[in-house]
Image (cartoon, rainbow, N blue to C red):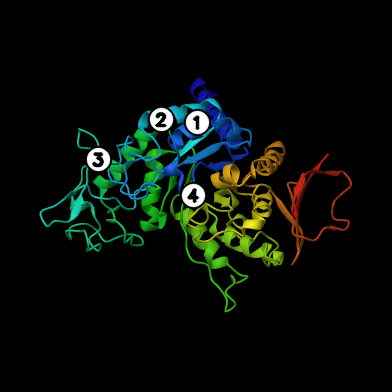
């Protein structure tokens, strides 16, 4: 073997070792804000900075921060000047950089909320339409005109752009993501957020607003440490108003999107959320599919699933699709012991008084090395009880039935418990 071949083999083995290490690591995401966090006294960034230690104690590896740019809406989801980080209602650019540095010092990576499907104009064109965009820099980056808007967004477009490659968004101009100049400008902006501001990864808002093939371009152009997309589609419901038992179409939509986007990006597991919040209402039999697997995305593609109980849209003060409030800890007992990447919600952790219970469940996950691809053996599933073993090391029970019969081996001991849930660890 030549010296050159030896070096190549060594590099290959090191790369493989790094991949295996990263893929086998326990990952826990923390959403660092709620819908009203933009009103936080003194700014959310400064408030979070004093809580980094508390977040780190839960074994959190990544924190999802709110949209950082100037925005028409205080929450940040109607952005305009993308490079302007001083006009955010969460704090100024210096505050953000300081917060990111504090998280990094505690071993936590930072995920930016990327809102690029749509954008608000800061000036009117000759027609009197708000469709002239300013990037927020003196060098003209991301200074765009109506040509960068999808031609079928007739409220704002001048008709020269491409048709929308995804779903329409009525509240603001739909950006033409098939425009190569738009793609390059957004990639440059995201890479600036990484290399200069300090972000490590992305959460893509309204990701179904443009083609998965475009998402693949953004992923390849920015190489994030972690990325997850919001693909929130309606589940199928029966005449009783409850979700149908079989949600395969819903979860395969998520899986197919992740694959079409290149396979590296994850998707929020809305399927698991919808099934889980119905199941805890006395229908825990829902938590297994006909093949004995978990019924959500985590049952077919766990390595690409981010599970959650609620977020700033579904819960918080919006309450668009909330988890039953008296059963939230059952939800966390499930997602923090199961495959996929679990996400802890700011409101639950800091304002609901659930800090200790959530942290104890997260500690079990970290201590036992549960990962996104851990094995799952569902041991019982009835109306009032669900029991599952993960990696042969952890057993979780949720539901009001107290007795678990002889399901728990003698070498398993209780690690943590609460109202209608219990977790055991192998000794």
Name which quarter of the figure residue 160 lies in. bottom left
Residue 135 marker? 3
| Whole-number angstrom distance, CA of label 3 to CA of label 2 | 21 Å
Mark 2 or 4, closer to the camera: 2
Q: Name the residue carrying label 2.
A: 95
Between 375 and 82, the one lying in front of the other is: 82
Of labels 4 and 3, the one closer to you: 3
**Residue 92 position in % (x across, y down):** 36, 33
Which mark, by number, is residue 263? 4
Quadrant containing the N terminus is top right
The residues tagged by marks 4 and 1 sit, at their Cα atoms, a distance apart of: 33 Å
Element under disc 2: helix
Q: Could you tell me if the residues under marks 1 and 2 are in contact, i.e. CB atoms within 8 Å?
A: yes
Mark 1 or 3 closer to N-term?
A: 1
Assign the C terminus to one quadrant of the image.
Answer: top right
Mark 4 or mark 1, which is nearer to you? 1
Crowding at dot 3, Cα within 10 Å, few <14 / some 14-19 / many 20+, comes out as: many
Q: CA distance from mark 4 to mark 3?
A: 31 Å
- Residue 266 screen position, x and y as percent: 51, 49
Q: Is residue 365 left or right of residue 262?
A: right
Mark 1 vs mark 2, CA separation in Å:
9 Å
Closer to us: mark 1 or mark 3? 1
Residue at the image point whose x is 34% and y is 41% from the top: 69
Asked if labels 4 and 2 touch by Cβ distance under 8 angstroms, the answer is: no
Are there few (<14), some (14-19), or many (20+) residues within 10 Å of tag 2? some
- Does label 4 or label 3 sit earlier along the sequence? 3
Q: Nearer the viewer, residue 300 or 11?
A: 300
């Amino acid at each position: 073997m030549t010296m050159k071949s030896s070096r190549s083999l060594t590099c290959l083995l090191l790369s493989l070792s790094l991949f295996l290490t990263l893929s086998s690591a326990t990952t826990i995401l923390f959403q660092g804000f709620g819908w009203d966090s933009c009103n936080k006294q003194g700014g959310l960034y400064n408030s979070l900075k004093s809580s980094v230690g508390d977040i780190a104690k839960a074994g959190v590896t990544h924190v999802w921060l709110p949209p950082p740019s100037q925005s028409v809406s205080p929450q940040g989801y109607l952005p305009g000047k993308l490079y302007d980080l001083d006009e955010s209602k969460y704090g100024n650019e210096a505050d953000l950089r300081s917060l990111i540095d504090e998280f990094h010092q505690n071993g936590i990576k930072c995920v930016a909320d990327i809102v690029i499907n749509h954008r608000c104009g800061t000036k009117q064109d000759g027609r009197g339409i708000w469709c002239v965009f300013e990037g927020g820099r003196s060098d003209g980056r991301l200074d765009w005109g109506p040509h960068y808007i999808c031609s079928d967004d007739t409220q704002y477009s001048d008709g020269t752009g491409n048709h929308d490659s995804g779903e329409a968004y009525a509240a603001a101009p739909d950006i033409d993501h098939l425009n190569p100049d738009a793609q390059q400008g957004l990639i440059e902006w995201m890479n600036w957020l990484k290399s200069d501001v300090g972000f490590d990864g992305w959460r893509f808002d309204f990701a179904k607003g443009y083609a998965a093939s475009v998402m693949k371009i953004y992923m390849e152009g920015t190489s994030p440490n972690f990325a997850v997309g919001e693909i929130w589609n309606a589940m199928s419901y029966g005449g009783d108003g409850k979700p149908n038992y079989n949600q395969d179409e819903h979860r395969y939509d998520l899986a197919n999107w992740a694959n079409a986007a290149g396979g590296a990006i994850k998707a929020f597991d809305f399927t698991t959320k919808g099934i889980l919040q119905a199941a805890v209402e006395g229908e825990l039999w829902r938590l297994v599919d006909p093949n004995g697997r978990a019924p959500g995305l985590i049952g077919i593609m766990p390595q690409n699933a981010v599970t959650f109980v609620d977020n700033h849209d579904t819960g918080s003060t919006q309450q668009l699709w909330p988890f039953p409030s008296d059963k939230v800890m059952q939800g966390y007992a499930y997602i923090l012991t199961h495959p996929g990447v679990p996400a802890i919600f700011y409101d639950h952790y800091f304002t609901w008084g659930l800090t200790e219970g959530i942290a104890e469940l997260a500690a079990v996950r970290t201590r036992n090395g549960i990962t996104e691809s851990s094995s799952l053996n569902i041991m019982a599933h009835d109306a009032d009880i669900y029991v599952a073993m993960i990696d042969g090391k952890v057993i979780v029970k949720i539901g009001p039935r107290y007795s678990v019969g002889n399901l728990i081996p003698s070498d398993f001991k209780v690690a943590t418990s609460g109202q209608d849930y219990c977790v055991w660890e192998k000794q």
